[in-house]
Amino acid sequence: MYDNLYKDLSTIANNGCSSQMVGLDENLESVASDSDYRLNLSFVGQPLSVGLTNERVAGLELTASPVAALSIEAFGGLPLDAVDRRGIVENLVYGGRIGTQHLSLGQIGLSVIYDNAEDYSEEITDMDLTIGPWLAINGSSRHTENVWREHRYSATLGWEAFTLSPLYEYFFIEDDACRIETESHRFGFLADTDETIYVTGTDLGWEKNDHLNFGIRTRHFTYEQRDEEALYYGGLFSLKASSGNSLSFEVGTMQGKQPETIYSLVQAEATIKDIFGIKGGFCGLTGRYIDYDHQVQDRTMAIHTAVETGLRFLGGRVETKLSGIYQEDPYFEDHFEGMLTIAFVH
């Protein structure tokens, strides 16, 4: 949970603000009344989401539902680093998704993304399947220059109050720079390597009601070049009030063979809505503490904290937020970041 917040704040700091214009949100007279067509126009790198993809491109995104049970999405445009490439055609990032929707038995979708970069071409495929409320499956792969760069497969099975979520991942660490930053305790020591990592594991959860959840998490990491394996296991707890306030904890331990893969971890997240009795006010706090069994880069611990507080007004269309991040980590310099953001939500 902290990882997602840290990634979002880092993205804002690195890429600045972007704007989006939305148009054409109406039923066309030439099709049936249950048809729907939407067109989004992005000018400076607004994220366009298709399937699992969240590409930041300046371009077009089209969403269509020619019939009630079918959805079609397509996008195309130029990435943020297009200035460093050659020609408009060579710069294009484009893709789409076709899927079923509003079906009682289940839904299925297939996504394909193609990035036609200057030095390489990259193709990402993604498949998602949902069968009633009991089963959801997702699988994605990325292919670059005749090399499979990554595979990610996950499923969620539900039975009464229990959920079982197995997963499998295979990826090159050099392709996941953001993951190195946000999950430095797991992958920070691989920042200057071209390591290949295999991850298997599962989450087992028990939901007593809409407010209280318990779970167990296991992850097995295999590092190909280091010829090392590590096992992580931990407990999960979350509590959510009807007001929207929430609190969650994860307590776990990583057991590997090297000092950087032997540690205990505690992380927590809290969200408070309508803080100080101000309607639309909010505050979020996240933190992670790591205790290494042995010294790592002359350190025996790591601390990551993030705080954000803000206010939504004008019917939720405007959000003002003040955020701060503090970090002590063996793999990065200690630092503090603060930022003020104003977002206009259509």
Image (cartoon, helix red, strand yellow):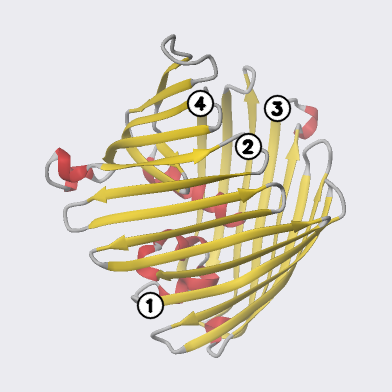
Reading the chain from its start, which is encountered first: label 3 or label 2?
2
Reading the chain from its start, which is encountered first: label 2 or label 1?
2
**Tag 3 near tag 2, CB within 8 Å:** no
What residue do we see at 76% from left, 31% from top?
274
Task: Kindly report the distance in space between the C-alpha atoms of the residues bearing marks 1 and 3.
Answer: 45 Å
Q: Which residue is mark 1?
A: 195
Residue 296: image location, x then y, percent: 52, 82
Q: Quadrant of residue 42?
A: top left
- Along the line of sight, which residue is nearer the eye, 322 or 86? 86
Reading the chain from its start, which is encountered first: label 3 or label 4?
4
Classify 10 Å Cα crowding around label 3: few (below 14), some (14-19), many (20 and above): some
SS for dot 3 = loop
Task: Kindly report the distance in space between the C-alpha atoms of the residues bearing marks 4 and 2.
Answer: 12 Å
Task: Kindly report the distance in space between the C-alpha atoms of the residues bearing marks 3 and 2.
Answer: 36 Å
Reading the chain from its start, which is encountered first: label 4 or label 1?
4
SS for dot 2 = loop
Mark number, residue 280? 3
**Tag 1 near tag 3, CB within 8 Å:** no
Mark number, residue 67? 4
What residue do we see at 36% from left, 60% from top?
142
Q: Which residue is mark 2?
A: 103
Residue 317: image location, x then y, percent: 58, 21
Left or right, 287 with respect to 260, comes to: right
Classify 10 Å Cα crowding around label 1: few (below 14), some (14-19), many (20 and above): some
**Tag 4 near tag 2, CB within 8 Å:** no
